[in-house]
Image (tube, grey):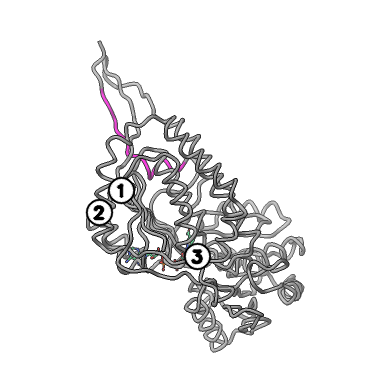
């Protein structure tokens, strides 16, 4: 059994959970200890005790550790990518790419540790100097979802450590394998005991204890859990950052390049089994291109190879678990009851190994008021909303409680520019899928998708540091 990491030691839990391969439910990936509330509190205390010394560590020391983590991830990309795909179900190429992404993030923040910004501003008073300094916040609680088991932990842990914070990391209970492998690398990379702690287990059991023990919490997951985390964090008056769901629109205008639009839709809506917060689940298509677009997307979806994540040639892996599969099937049934037309897919598939296989599902004749277009499904399911023109497309695109990503496919500079300026989302894509991002620029959404400062790139400094304004009498 793989243990929790608390105060520099590997510690057994009160119990364990087995991690099941969604491509083959007879394959147990591993067995992982489950922490209880007391152990989480212990991890937070260890982090608190380690904080003063870590906050005074040199940027070079922190940069070297983060760089070493990045190098080991890169060197082990095939092995760890295989583990990731085996436990989460994304295809091997995507599993490996995600490990590489995690490595890039660690290396990026190794550089940022050497570039911690500050500012000198002239005082309004004579003989006074003013410096604006950035200091670490303290102990950061990190809560992550299952769909990017390496990349999301990386883009939270790396900046937390780079800016001199200590960490208590709680990964999603469905994907402890990737989290444990990452924690083991960090633990060996030279962080002093207590600076980095791993506690595994269901959020319903240990989430509250985590929020109660830390100075700030960064969360990625569903809206319902995010709201709960935020309420508890506000109760303690600690800072909190939330990245949550999406119902991301991709607009396709009559003047779009059909091939680009179809590629963007198939990739953005269905790759990684549609289990991306940035997936384009609403395809908002103008009348003149609607039928050609639907025919071409349907034809591509019917050819996509759905199967075991590790099997060569697979393009779409399984859904992550039985609960998510039930949710996907329930939304498919709801859409049909609401009058949407199922163009293709939406059926459970059997393969050589028992797994949670679902054929990519496209709905047409949907309206933006239907539940299928209001609520996040988080599976290989997308719907087409037919609109008259660009103005209606923009209004439908923005008519959602979410605001994570959005996209437009068009050859019109005028409409692309207008959409970029008027889309109510944190990410806007022109002639690109709504999912698929760079690691060195800010990431995050608006409205119900996000709360707090942006993640990633140099903008991560906002959440992971606390500003101090220092006045000095000169001379
Ligand atoms: P989830 O909300 O069920 O779980 C997320 C994490 O919260 C898990 O680690 C879980 O154990 C923990 N948790 C559960 N209850 C808790 C509590 N009371 N206190 C503290 N932590 C608790 O989400 P999920 O099913 O793992 O992930 C899917 C969701 O994540 C989707 O809604 C998706 O859109 C979202 N997501 C968002 C982004 C983004 O950056 N915006 C990225 C990836 C996934």
Q: Earlier in the sequence, mark 1 or mark 2?
A: 1
* Residues at circles 1 and 2 in contact by the CB criterion of under 8 Å: yes
Query: For ligand 1, which image quadrant applies?
Result: bottom left
- In the picture as drawn, the residue positioned furthest to the front comes out as 1
| Disc 2: CA contacts within 10 A as few (<14), some (14-19) or many (>=20) | some
- Estimate the x, y position of residue 316 in percent, counting from the top left: 65, 70
Label 2: which residue? 42
Q: Is residue 432 visible?
A: yes
Residue range in magenta is 459-471
- In the picture as drawn, the residue positioned furthest to the top comes out as 475
- Estimate the x, y position of residue 183 in percent, counting from the top left: 43, 51
Q: Earlier in the sequence, mark 3 or mark 1?
A: 1
Quarter of the figure with residue 225? bottom left
Label 2: state its secondary structure.
Answer: helix
- Estimate the x, y position of residue 102 in percent, counting from the top left: 53, 49
Quarter of the figure with residue 118? top left
Quarter of the figure with residue 302? bottom right
Q: Is residue 302 above or below residue 451?
A: below
Nearer to us in this view, 174 or 226: 174
Q: Residue at x 55, y 57 (%)?
A: 423
Q: Residue at x 55, y 64 (%)?
A: 276
Label 1: which residue? 7
Which quarter of the image is occupied by the N terminus? bottom left
Q: Earlier in the sequence, mark 2 or mark 3?
A: 2
Q: Is the C-beta of the residue carrying label 3 under 8 Å from the nearest atom of ligand 1? A: yes
- Estimate the x, y position of residue 144 in percent, counting from the top left: 42, 59
Label 3: state its secondary structure.
Answer: loop
Which quarter of the image is occupied by the C terminus? top left
Alpha carbon distance from label 3 to label 1: 36 Å
């Amino acid at each position: 059994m793989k243990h929790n990491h608390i105060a520099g030691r590997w510690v057994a839990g009160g119990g364990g959970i087995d991690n099941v391969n969604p491509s083959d439910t007879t394959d147990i990936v591993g067995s992982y200890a489950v922490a209880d509330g007391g152990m989480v509190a212990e991890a937070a205390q260890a982090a608190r005790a380690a904080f003063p010394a870590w906050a005074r560590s040199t940027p070079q020391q922190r940069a070297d550790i983060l760089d070493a983590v990045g190098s080991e991830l890169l060197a082990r990309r095939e092995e760890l990518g295989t583990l990731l795909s085996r436990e989460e179900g994304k295809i091997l190429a995507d599993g490996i790419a995600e490990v590489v992404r995690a490595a890039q993030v660690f290396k990026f923040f190794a550089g940022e540790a050497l570039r911690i910004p500050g500012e000198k501003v002239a005082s309004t008073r004579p003989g006074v100097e003013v410096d604006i300094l950035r200091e670490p916040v303290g102990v950061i609680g990190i809560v992550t979802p299952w769909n990017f088991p390496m990349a999301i932990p990386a883009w939270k842990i790396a900046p937390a450590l780079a800016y001199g914070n200590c960490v208590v990391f709680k990964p999603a209970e469905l994907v402890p394998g990737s989290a444990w492998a990452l924690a083991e690398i960090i633990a060996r990379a030279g962080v002093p005991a207590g600076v980095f702690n791993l506690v595994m287990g269901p959020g319903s059991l240990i989430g509250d204890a985590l929020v109660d023990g830390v100075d700030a919490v960064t969360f990625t997951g569903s809206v319902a859990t995010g709201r709960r985390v935020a309420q508890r964090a506000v109760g303690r008056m600690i800072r909190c950052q939330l990245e949550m769901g999406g119902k991301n629109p991709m607009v396709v205008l009559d003047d779009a390049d059909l091939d680009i639009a179809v590629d963007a839709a198939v990739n953005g809506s269905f790759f990684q089994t549609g289990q991306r917060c940035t997936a384009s689940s609403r395809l908002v298509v103008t009348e003149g291109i609607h039928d050609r677009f639907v025919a071409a997307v349907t034809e591509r979806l019917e050819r996509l190879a759905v199967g075991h994540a590790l099997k060569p040639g697979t393009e779409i892996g399984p859904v992550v678990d039985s609960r998510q599969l039930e949710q996907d099937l329930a939304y498919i049934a709801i859409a049909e009851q609401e009058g949407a037309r199922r163009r293709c897919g939406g059926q459970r598939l059997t393969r050589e190994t028992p797994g949670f296989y679902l054929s990519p599902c496209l709905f047409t004749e949907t309206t933006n008021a239907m539940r299928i277009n209001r609520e996040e499904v988080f599976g290989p399911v997308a719907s087409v909303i037919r609109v008259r023109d660009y103005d209606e497309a923009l209004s439908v695109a923005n008519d959602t409680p979410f605001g994570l990503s959005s996209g437009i496919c068009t050859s019109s500079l005028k409409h692309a520019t207008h959409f970029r300026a008027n889309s109510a989302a944190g990410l806007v894509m022109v002639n690109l899928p709504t999912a698929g991002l760079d690691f060195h620029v800010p990431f995050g959404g608006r409205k119900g998708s996000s709360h707090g400062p942006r993640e990633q790139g140099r903008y991560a400094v906002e959440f992971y540091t606390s500003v101090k304004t220092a006045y000095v009498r000169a001379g």
